[in-house]
Amino acid sequence: MVEMGMTDKQFNGFVRFLLDALKEAKEEKEDDKKDEKISKIIDNLQKTLED
């Protein structure tokens, strides 16, 4: 099986995306919306690991 890695630029882009999503969730005032955003981040990370 051939594994494909990502370039440094791709990894940096991924980290920027994740950081932006986490900052947005942190700034959310309503607990329900904050929990929803964090759950979405977790789901996206899980899907990334499964790919």
Image (tube, rainbow, N blue to C red):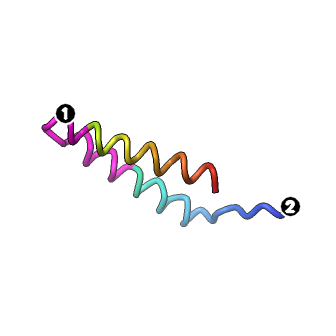
Instruction: Please report contact status of discs 2 and 1: CB closer than 8 Å, yes or no.
Output: no
Image quadrant holding the N terminus, namely bottom right
Corner quadrant of residue 37: top left
The secondary structure type at the circle numbered 1 is: helix
Q: Is residue 31 left or right of residue 10?
A: left
Answer above or below: position of 4 versus 36: below
What secondary structure prevails in the magenta region?
helix
Q: Residue at x 70, y 61 (%)?
A: 5
Label located before the other in sequence (2 or 1): 2
SS at badge 2: loop
Q: Amino acid at mark 2?
A: Met
Could you classify mark 1 by the number of other residues whose Cα lies within 10 Å: few (under 14), some (14-19), or many (20 or more)? few
Left or right, 28 with respect to 11, comes to left
Where residue 25 appears, x then y in whole percent? 26, 43
Q: Which residue is mark 1?
A: 31
Residue in front for this viewpoint, 19 or 1: 1
Residue 40, image x, y percentages: 38, 47
Q: Amino acid at mark 1?
A: Asp
Q: Is residue 4 magenta?
A: no
- Residue 22 appears left or right of 24: right
Q: Give the image location of residue 34, x and y in percent.
A: 24, 39
Taking the spot 14% from the left edge, 37% from the top edge, the residue there is 30
The numbered dot on residue 51 is: none
What residue appears at the point 73 percent right and 64 percent down from the top-left corner?
Answer: 4
At horizontal 29% and vertical 42% (from top left) the residue drawn is 36
Q: Which residues are magenta?
A: 19-34
Q: Quadrant of the C terminus?
A: bottom right
- In this view, which residue lies farthest toward the left? 29
On residue 1, the disc is: 2
